[in-house]
Image (spheres, grey):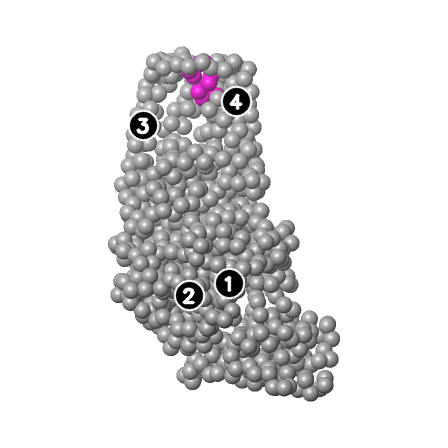
C-alpha cells in the first residue's frame, strides 16, 4: 500500500507516527540528500551513523554532540561577511543534530520533521548565490519518506 | 604670631576667604556642567523623565540589589559608616550647631558628646579602611591617582584635628582648634575643584540617569 | 565617510560631551563599584576592565576643554594630551571588553550612566580610526549592501519564497497601507530563518495586516555598535523612508537587542525629528496581541526553563514584563534567574563584541557569568529573544559542554499556536 504524501500536512503527520528509530533513520536520509552542500566531511560520517539501524546509543550520542559542535562552529557571526554556501553547511549540521536528538521540547514535529526543515534551509541557502530559486527539496523529502515506508512495509510483512 | 592671633585669623578672615572660594567654586562647577547643554530626546517616551529622575535620586542611596550589596560589601558599608559619621559630626555636634546658629540664626538639637565622639572615631576608622582598600585592591590601585589621596587627606584631617582638639591632645587647645578650622578651610577651598563635588553633583547625575531611564520605562 | 584621524576623533569626542557627561565626570569618586557589576571584569579579574576606566581619554578631554581647572592646567603645561597611541590602546577596552550592556550604570552610587558615555566614546574612537576591523566591515556592508552581513534582497526573497512554501500562504512585500512593517536582522535571516515564518503565522492568526519592505529589510544597526552616527543615521533613514512610503502605523523591530535600541531610542534623535509611526519590539506586539486575546496558543512545555534577558531589550529598552507574560503562556515550569529582569547579566556578545574576532576569547570567558547563573538554576532549557544572544549562549554552552537547548521566544510561541479547525482548507 503506497502512502500518499504530497503535502506538508500529510508529511508531518506521517513523520510523527514513526517509531524513534525510524524517525532517526528517515531524518538521516533527509540530511543525506543535502550533505554534499556542506564542506565539513565529518558530516558524511555523522549521516552514515544516523542512517544505520545498528548504531549504538554511545555512537549516536557522540555523533549528536559532534553535529551540534559543528553547527555552533559554522553559524555566521553577527556582522561577519555572510556566505550562503557556507551557511548551507550550518543548516546541514543543524539538520544532522536534529535527527539525532530525541523529541526536543519547544520544537514540535519530532526529530525527522526538524531535520527535514533544516535540510530544506540548506538547499535554499545553497541556491541563493546560484540564483536557482528555492528548489523543491520538499518534493524530494516526500519521496524519501514514502519510499522508506514502502520498504519497511515489505520488510516487515 | 601667638596661638590666639592665629585662631582669630582662621576664625575671621580665613573663614571668609574659604567661604567665598567655596561658594564661587560650587557655582562655577554647576555652570560648567549646565553650559554643556543636552540635546532634546525626540523618541517617543513611555513616561515623563522628570519624576523618574527624582525617584532615582532617592533610590540610589541604596545598593541596586542584594547581589550588588554582596559583591561590593566593603565599599558600601565603609562608605556609609563614613558618610553617616560625617553627617553626625558635622551637623549634630553642639559646638558646630552653635557655629551655624551664629552664621544663619538657625539651630537644632545636638547629640550627646560621647555619641558624637563615637561617630568621629568610627568615621576615621572607616576612612582608614577605605584607604587600605584603595591601596590594596587591584581595581582601585589602577584607578587611583594623587587626586584621590589628596582628597582623602583633606577629608581625614578635620576629623583628626577635631578629635584631638576636643580631647585636648598633643598640642595646646588653641593651636589644635586653629589647625582644625584651618583644615576645614583647606577642605572648603579645594572642595569645588575635586571629586568632593559629588556631594552636590550626585543629585544632578542621578537625576539625568533616572530621567533617561524613566523615559524608557525603566526604574533605576 | 571622511578619512579617520586623531583630529577628527578628538573633535567627535568633544561634540559628544554634554551636561550629563560633565556631571558624571564631576561626580565619579573612584569607588570601583562599577567593576563589580561588569561581567568582563568579574570573570577575568582584570582591573583594566573597570568600566569608568574605559572612558579615561574622554574624561581628560572634558577636563582640559570644559573645566576652569583643566584649562589652567593646560595653560601651564600640566595636562597630558590625548594621542592616537592612547586611543589605539583604548580600543580593546572600549570595544572588546564592553557589550554596552549597561549593568555598570545600574550600580554607580553617584548615579553615573556609564554605558551612555561609552556609547559616545565610540564616536570618537571610530572617527579616529580605532574601531575593530569586523565592525568597520559590517558598517560598510550595511551601508553599501543593506545588511552588515552582506544579505542581499535577492537572499531575502529566496528566504521569503521558502517560507511561503512551508507556510502555504504569501508573505506581503511592499504592501502599502499595512498596519505593521516587519523588520528582520541579518542574524535571523541567515541563522534563524524560522523567525519570519513564526511571525507570519502569528500575524496571520491574529488577522493583522503586515508587510516587509524590499528597501528596508534590515533592522541591525552597525553604526550604533561601531559608534558612527552618520552611518547609524543612514541606516535608520532607510527604515523611516520605507515606513513612510508604505504608510504603516507601526514598525516592528525583530529579536535583536541593539536593533531595538537603534530604531526605538536613538532613531528619532539620529534623523532629527520624531517619527510619525510607532516603533515596537516584536515582543511588545505579541504581548499586545495576547492582551487583546488575538494570540491563541495551546499546550505548554513542562520542562524547567528560564529566560535570558537581552540587555538592550530589557535593561536599556524597557521591555521587561512582556517576555515573561508571553513565556508563561507556553511554559508551565518557568523559573527566574536570581539576577533577572533589568539586573540580569549580559550574554557577553552584544554591542559589536561578537563581530570582533579579537574579542573571541574574552567573550567566552565572560560567558562564565551566565554559566554560573544557569548552574545555580539547573534548568532544562533556556529561552531568549535576541538572535545574537542565542548564538552567544549556544556557543558558550557548547564550549562548557552544557547540553541545554536555547529557544527563541517568538518561535516558541508560534510552535504552540492553536492549529486550524479540522475541515478548514489549509
Q: Residue at x 53, y 26 (%)?
A: B123
Query: Could you confirm whether marks 3 and 2 are on the same chain?
Result: no
Q: Secondary structure at mark 4?
A: helix
Horizontal and vertical percent position of residue C322:
46, 52
* Residue at mark 1: C418
* Residue at mark 3: B23
Q: Secondary structure at mark 1?
A: loop
The answer to whether the residue labelled 4 contacts the one labelled 2, judged by CB atoms less than 8 Å apart, is: no
Nearer the observer, C206 or B100? C206
Query: Could you confirm whether marks 4 and 3 are on the same chain?
Result: yes
Q: CA distance from mark 4 to mark 3?
A: 26 Å
Q: Nearer the viewer, mark 4 or mark 2?
A: 2
How busy is the neighbourhood of tag 3: few (under 14 within 10 Å), some, or many (20 plus)? some
* Residue at mark 4: B120
Residue C365 seen in this snapshot: no
Nearer the observer, A110 or B51? A110
> Label 4 lies in what chain?
B
Q: Which residues are magenta?
A: B89-97
Horizontal and vertical percent position of residue C195:
47, 66
Amino acid at each position: 500500500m503506497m502512502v500518499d504524501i504530497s503535502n506538508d500536512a500529510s508529511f508531518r503527520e506521517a513523520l510523527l507516527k514513526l517509531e524513534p528509530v525510524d524517525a532517526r533513520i528517515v531524518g538521516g536520509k533527509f540530511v543525506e540528500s543535502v550533505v554534499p552542500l556542506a564542506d565539513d566531511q565529518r558530516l558524511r560520517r555523522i549521516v552514515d551513523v544516523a542512517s544505520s539501524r545498528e548504531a549504538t546509543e554511545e555512537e549516536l550520542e557522540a555523533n549528536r554532540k559532534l553535529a551540534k559542535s559543528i553547527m555552533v562552529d559554522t553559524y555566521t557571526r553577527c556582522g561577519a561577511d555572510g556566505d550562503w554556501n557556507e551557511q548551507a553547511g550550518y543548516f546541514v549540521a543543524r539538520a544532522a543534530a536534529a535527527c539525532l536528538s530525541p523529541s526536543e521540547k519547544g520544537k514540535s514535529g519530532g526529530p525527522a520533521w526538524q531535520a527535514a526543515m533544516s535540510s530544506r534551509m540548506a538547499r535554499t541557502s545553497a541556491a541563493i548565490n546560484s540564483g536557482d530559486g528555492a528548489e523543491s527539496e520538499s518534493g524530494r523529502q516526500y519521496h524519501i519518506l514514502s519510499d522508506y515506508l514502502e520498504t519497511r512495509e515489505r520488510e516487515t510483512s | 604670631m601667638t596661638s590666639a592671633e592665629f585662631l582669630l585669623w582662621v576664625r575671621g578672615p580665613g573663614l571668609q576667604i574659604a567661604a567665598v572660594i567655596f561658594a564661587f567654586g560650587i557655582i562655577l562647577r554647576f555652570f560648567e556642567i549646565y553650559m554643556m547643554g543636552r540635546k532634546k530626546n525626540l523618541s517617543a517616551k513611555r513616561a515623563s523623565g522628570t519624576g523618574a529622575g527624582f525617584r532615582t535620586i532617592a533610590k540610589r542611596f541604596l545598593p541596586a540589589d542584594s547581589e550588588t550589596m554582596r559583591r561590593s560589601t566593603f565599599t558600601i558599608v565603609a562608605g556609609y559608616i563614613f558618610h553617616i559619621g560625617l553627617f553626625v559630626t558635622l551637623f549634630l555636634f553642639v559646638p558646630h550647631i552653635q557655629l551655624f546658629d551664629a552664621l544663619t540664626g538657625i539651630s537644632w538639637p545636638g547629640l550627646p558628646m560621647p555619641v558624637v565622639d563615637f561617630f568621629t572615631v568610627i568615621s576615621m576608622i572607616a576612612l582608614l579602611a577605605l584607604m587600605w582598600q584603595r591601596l590594596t585592591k587591584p581595581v582601585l590601585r589602577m584607578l587611583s591617582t594623587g587626586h584621590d589621596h589628596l582628597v582623602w587627606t583633606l577629608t581625614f584631617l578635620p576629623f583628626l584635628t577635631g578629635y584631638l582638639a576636643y580631647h585636648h591632645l598633643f598640642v595646646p587647645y588653641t593651636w589644635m582648634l586653629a589647625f582644625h578650622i584651618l583644615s576645614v578651610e583647606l577642605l572648603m577651598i579645594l572642595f569645588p575643584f575635586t571629586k568632593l563635588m559629588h556631594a552636590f553633583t550626585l543629585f544632578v547625575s542621578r537625576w539625568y540617569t533616572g530621567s533617561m531611564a524613566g523615559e524608557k520605562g525603566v526604574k533605576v | 565617510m571622511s578619512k579617520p584621524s586623531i583630529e577628527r576623533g578628538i573633535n567627535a569626542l568633544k561634540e559628544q560631551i554634554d551636561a550629563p557627561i560633565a556631571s558624571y565626570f564631576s561626580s565619579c569618586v573612584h569607588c570601583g563599584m562599577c567593576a563589580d557589576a561588569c561581567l568582563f571584569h568579574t570573570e577575568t579579574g582584570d582591573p583594566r576592565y573597570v568600566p569608568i576606566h574605559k572612558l579615561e581619554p574622554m574624561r581628560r578631554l572634558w577636563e582640559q576643554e570644559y573645566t576652569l581647572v583643566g584649562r589652567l592646567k593646560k595653560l601651564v603645561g600640566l595636562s597630558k594630551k590625548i594621542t592616537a597611541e592612547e586611543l589605539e590602546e583604548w580600543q580593546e577596552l572600549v570595544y572588546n571588553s564592553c557589550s554596552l550592556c549597561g549593568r555598570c550604570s545600574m550600580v554607580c552610587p553617584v548615579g553615573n550612566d556609564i554605558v551612555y558615555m561609552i556609547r559616545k566614546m565610540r564616536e570618537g574612537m571610530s572617527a579616529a580610526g580605532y574601531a575593530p576591523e569586523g565592525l568597520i566591515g559590517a558598517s560598510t556592508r550595511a551601508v553599501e549592501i543593506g545588511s552588515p552581513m552582506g544579505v542581499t534582497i535577492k537572499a531575502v526573497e529566496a528566504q521569503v519564497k521558502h517560507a511561503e512554501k512551508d507556510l502555504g500562504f504569501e508573505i506581503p512585500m511592499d504592501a502599502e497601507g499595512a498596519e505593521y512593517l516587519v523588520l528582520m536582522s541579518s542574524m535571523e535571516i541567515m541563522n534563524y530563518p524560522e523567525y519570519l515564518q513564526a511571525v507570519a503565522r502569528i500575524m496571520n492568526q491574529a488577522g493583522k495586516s503586515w508587510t516587509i519592505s524590499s528597501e528596508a529589510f534590515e533592522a541591525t544597526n552597525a553604526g550604533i555598535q561601531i559608534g558612527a552616527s552618520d552611518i547609524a543615521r543612514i541606516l535608520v533613514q532607510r527604515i523611516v523612508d520605507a515606513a513612510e512610503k508604505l504608510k504603516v502605523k507601526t514598525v516592528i523591530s525583530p529579536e535583536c537587542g541593539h536593533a531595538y535600541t537603534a530604531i526605538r531610542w536613538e532613531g528619532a534623535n539620529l534623523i532629527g525629528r520624531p517619527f510619525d509611526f510607532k516603533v515596537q519590539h516584536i515582543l511588545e506586539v505579541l504581548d499586545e496581541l495576547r492582551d487583546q486575546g488575538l494570540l491563541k496558543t495551546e499546550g505548554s512545555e513542562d520542562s524547567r526553563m528560564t529566560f535570558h534577558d537581552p540587555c538592550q531589550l530589557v535593561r536599556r529598552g524597557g521591555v521587561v514584563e512582556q517576555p515573561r507574560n508571553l513565556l508563561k503562556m507556553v511554559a508551565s515550569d518557568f523559573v527566574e534567574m536570581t539576577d533577572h529582569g533589568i539586573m540580569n547579566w549580559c550574554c557577553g556578545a552584544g554591542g559589536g563584541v561578537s563581530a570582533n574576532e579579537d574579542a573571541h576569547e574574552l567573550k567566552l570567558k565572560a560567558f562564565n557569568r551566565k554559566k554560573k547563573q544557569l548552574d545555580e538554576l539547573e534548568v532544562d532549557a533556556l529561552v531568549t529573544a535576541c538572535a545574537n544572544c542565542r548564538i552567544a549562549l549556544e556557543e558558550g554552552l557548547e564550549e562548557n559542554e552544557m547540553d541545554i537547548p536555547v529557544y527563541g521566544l517568538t518561535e516558541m510561541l508560534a510552535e504552540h499556536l492553536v492549529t486550524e479547525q479540522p475541515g478548514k482548507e489549509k
